[in-house]
Amino acid sequence: MIDKRLLAAALMFAATGATSCGVDAVDTSVNKELCHTDVTITGTMVPAAKPADYDPELGDTNCWPVGEWTFTASPRATNEDGSTQCPSTDLLAEYKVKVERDFVNDDLDTYTFVTNPNAKARMKVSSGGGGLCEGVFEFYSDNGMVLHNLHPALQPAPSAGANHPLTGHGEFHMYDTDQWVP
């Protein structure tokens, strides 16, 4: 016999969209998303020089996120899930993120949203394997009701010279309440 309380809890868990992802994903189950628009990302990354003692065995196929990421986000013609897009999107003309590495303190990376250094933002870059670097950049409006959730991807391209191409995807979201949690 199925325990009705467990079934109800499982259905509630599934209905709240408990599979969100991002930088320290926020549970927005009590907040209403008004709309979202899928976006496509294009741009370039100018890598910073690797230090002299950089492990040569890592080579050019290792994720090296240190440098300046510059990209644009353009609305897709339709949302992947078939939902109606937002009636308007306040996408920035350009997004610029600087990634720096502190080689003295455990190789910690720091992120600066150069386009708007005072913006409410969460940022990180992780290795997707095979040298892929994927950014997870979340930028919020001042009132926290608009989220730009952007995922530029960097494939190492040693033959591309100083600039490496960025591609990727993301979403523009509008909510009825403040989503920012510092």
Image: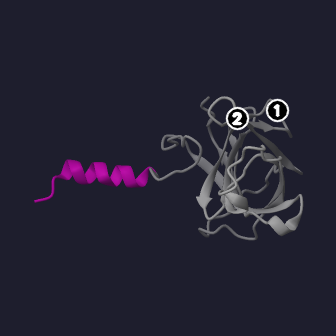
Q: Please tell me whether mark 2 sits on a helix, a strand or a loop.
A: loop
Labels 1 and 2: the sequence-earlier one: 2
Query: Residue 157: where, in percent of width, then height?
Result: 79, 66
Q: How crowded is mark 1: few (under 14 residues within 10 Å), some or many (20 or more)?
A: few
| Side of 86 where 70 appears, left or right | right
Give the residue type that dot 1 points to.
Pro
Tell me: residue 115, above or below residue 168: above
Q: What residue type is labelled 2?
A: Phe
- Dominant secondary structure of the magenta stretch? helix
Please provide percent x and percent y for residue 124.
Answer: 66, 44
Q: Residue 103 carries which label?
A: 2
Q: What stretch is highlighted in magenta?
A: 1-16
Q: Can residue 70 be seen in this view?
A: yes
Is 89 within the magenta? no
Front: mark 1 or 2: 2
Callout 2: 10 Å neighbours few (<14), some, many (20+)? few
Q: Which mark is residue 117?
A: 1
Q: Nearer the viewer, residue 150 or 31?
A: 150
Q: In this view, does 76 lie above or below 22?
A: below
